[in-house]
Image (tube, rainbow, N blue to C red):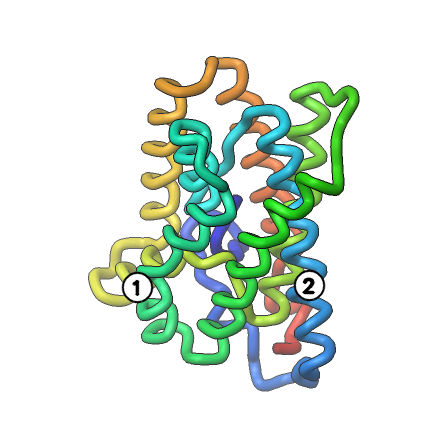
Amino acid sequence: MSDQPQDGPGTDQVAETTTGKGVGHSLLEDAQGLAYGTLMAGFGIVILTELGLITGQTAGLAVLISYVTGWSFGLIFFVVNLPFYWLGYRRMGWRFTIKTFVAVALLSFLSNWLKTQISFDFLTPWTGAVIFGMVTGSALLALFRHGASLGGVGILALYLQEKTGFRAGWTQLGFDACLFCAALFVLPLDKVLFSLLGAVIINFVIAINHRRDWYVAT
């Protein structure tokens, strides 16, 4: 699950969603955007964990830790993101940071609650990976377009890019590469490959649909 929106590998858009053109979102519009985004992301996590797959970024780290420890994904995801909010404030400002905190808190709750509301009698790994990728991609688009994210590594990557010049995309790619390598010690190879399929679809959906020149509201 990507933490930050991308036009392609290594590009930075969250802080540039506002271009000075168009009309900003109202509080109600932001609320529905965050509600939709976190609910769909939570549904994606239900699919992911039902199949025993993982994803990228801090969500993937939280899922992998939950598999190893048996602890709640929602709690782990919330805690893992805590160190990144200060960087988010420094890099993106307080509006982004507050919205991101709310999105992370909502996803932490909804991912656990939805498990009590949804069950699957039959779901093949490849179908689940594709649906997960599409649902999660649309969820992230909603969050990005309302000035929020799901925190984590994407914020750190942008901070390091600003301070050192090292491209954010490479930081994210390196983190995900390490995460999927670690997953090989926990999950069967076929599950890791299906997980990669889901991650590719997420980033494909974002790369195709998230562009500054198509959407300029905050």
Corner quadrant of residue 71: top left
The numbered mark at residue 14 is none
Front residue of 25 and 47? 47
> Does residue 32 appear left or right of residue 99 in this picture?
right
Q: Amino acid at mark 1?
A: Tyr
> In the rendered view, does 90 fall on the left or right side of 121?
left
Separation (CA) of disc 1 from disc 2: 27 Å
Which residue is identified by label 1? 159
**Kind of element beneath mark 1:** helix
Residue 7 occupies which quadrant of the picture? bottom right
Question: Percent position (x, y) of residue 31?
Answer: 68, 73
Label 2 is placed on what type of residue?
Ala
Residue 22 appears in the picture as rendered:
no
Mark 2 Cα within 10 Å, few/some/many (few <14, many 20+)?
A: some
Q: Which mark is residue 35?
A: 2
Q: Position of residue 183 (x, y in %)?
A: 40, 25
Q: Residue at x 78, y 22 (%)?
A: 121
Q: Residue furthest left?
A: 164
